Image (cartoon, grey):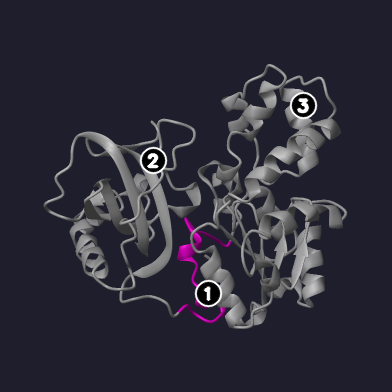
Amino acid sequence: MNGFNEEAKILAVIFDLDGTLLDTERATRGVLNEFLARYGKEVDKEKQEKRRLGMTQKETAAVTVQDYQLPITPDQFIKEITPLYRERWAEAKALPGANRLIKHLRKNGVPMALASNSLREYVDGKISHHEGWKESFSVILGSDQVKAGKPAPYLFEEAAKKLGVDAVNCLVIEDSLVGVKAANAAKMKVVAVPSRSETDCHGLANIVLHSLLEFQPELWGLPPFDDWVDKTLPIEPIRLNGLYVTGSLLETTENATLSLPDQVAGLYFGWSKFDPDRNFKILHVWFIDANSDHKSKQHMQIHLVGYIRAWDNKDLTSTESEKVEEYKSIARASLDLPSFPCFLQKSFARVTL
């Protein structure tokens, strides 16, 4: 990591929107399939997985029309599919850590800009569902307001210009490879919070995080957070529903709200419920309560209310495995505090699996 130095003090932060602050991908899941069905087509998952995040709307439209041999022009594709996306934008949730970081920077007087490859009209539509976001950004830009979108540097250069801050004093927070390349081209520092499909970011960003909850402002000469409670962080509650089968949580339908987005890998804790009368404390997917007697296959409701640290199961070492009991103890104690309340008394909508 190459972070803060006195010669290039960070004076402003520029955010990407989709996949960085907003979980728009999951909110709009199924839209393309619904659209293609009108033309007797189905989504080709292999083709979709090869798509690059961060493409402009016109680029996406042209590729889609070509991939599926649709009898329409890219402009017609945009006109027909956009209303379907608009309906889902209201459902796009802020990614964990997004509201916390925006509020923290605003409280400390750090200028912020929003620079997205979406059209400005769409950016305004998406953030309108999130209280205080529009007022928090001194500058908001869409790709239609500059000569070319990312990976060209123009969006970030224009954002810096409007903020009145030199590029060398700007920090960009991105989730996509094209966004990281744009920040590099603009000669700005960049923090990447990529999905698993954007692993190429690792070699180009100054630092790569699993989640915005890992972001440490002080590494960039910015005011540090002051909201930790001992060794744990209260978070905006994350509600999940799924099927518990002999120790594993399964997601078996497209509409199941079980797994977290790629960008939020970490060690979380909270509450789970198997039936209307019993709540259990959980750490990640481990049960803390010794008496958590549960059936081998049943619906589970999960309410995550706290965060401990970065954690990637793929890189789980023997040393970290030994620390699980320590983390369980930390989570157990925290869940007895008023900062980490249990909200499971109210019934959730149950997902049919």
What's the residue type where badge 3 is placed? Val
Mark 3 and mark 2 lie on one chain; the one further toward the N terminus is: 3
What's the residue type where badge 2 is placed? Arg
Q: Residue at x 79, y 65 (%)?
A: 157
Q: Which residue does the numbered mark 2 point to in the structure image?
A: 350
Q: Residue at x 71, y 72 (%)?
A: 168
Could you tell me which secondary element the residue under label 2 belongs to?
loop
Farthest residue in the left direction? 291
Magenta stretch: includes residue 236: no
User: Could you classify mark 1 by the number of other residues whose Cα lies within 10 Å: few (under 14), some (14-19), or many (20 or more)?
Assistant: some
Q: Which residue does the numbered mark 1 point to in the structure image?
A: 217
Q: Is residue 108 visible?
A: yes
What's the residue type where badge 1 is placed? Pro
Is there CB contact under 8 Å for labels 3 and 2?
A: no
The percent coordinates of residue 349 (x first, y second) are 41, 44
Q: Magenta residues? A: 206-225
In the image, is 267 to the left or to the right of 25? Answer: left
State whether residue 111 is above or below residue 303. Answer: below
Could you tell me which secondary element the residue under label 3 belongs to?
helix
Examine the image and state in which quarter residue 306 appears. Answer: bottom left
Which label was assigned to residue 18? none
Q: CA distance from mark 1 to mark 3?
A: 42 Å
Mark 2 and mark 1 lie on one chain; the one further toward the N terminus is: 1
The percent coordinates of residue 93 (x first, y second) are 55, 54
The percent coordinates of residue 220 (x first, y second) are 56, 75
The percent coordinates of residue 278 (x first, y second) are 21, 51
Q: CA distance from mark 2 to mark 1?
A: 39 Å
State whether residue 197 is above or below residue 305. Answer: above
Is there CB contact under 8 Å for labels 2 and 1?
A: no
User: Could you classify mark 3 by the number of other residues whose Cα lies within 10 Å: few (under 14), some (14-19), or many (20 or more)?
Assistant: some
Q: Which residue does the numbered mark 3 point to in the structure image?
A: 65
Of circles 1 and 3, which is in front? 3
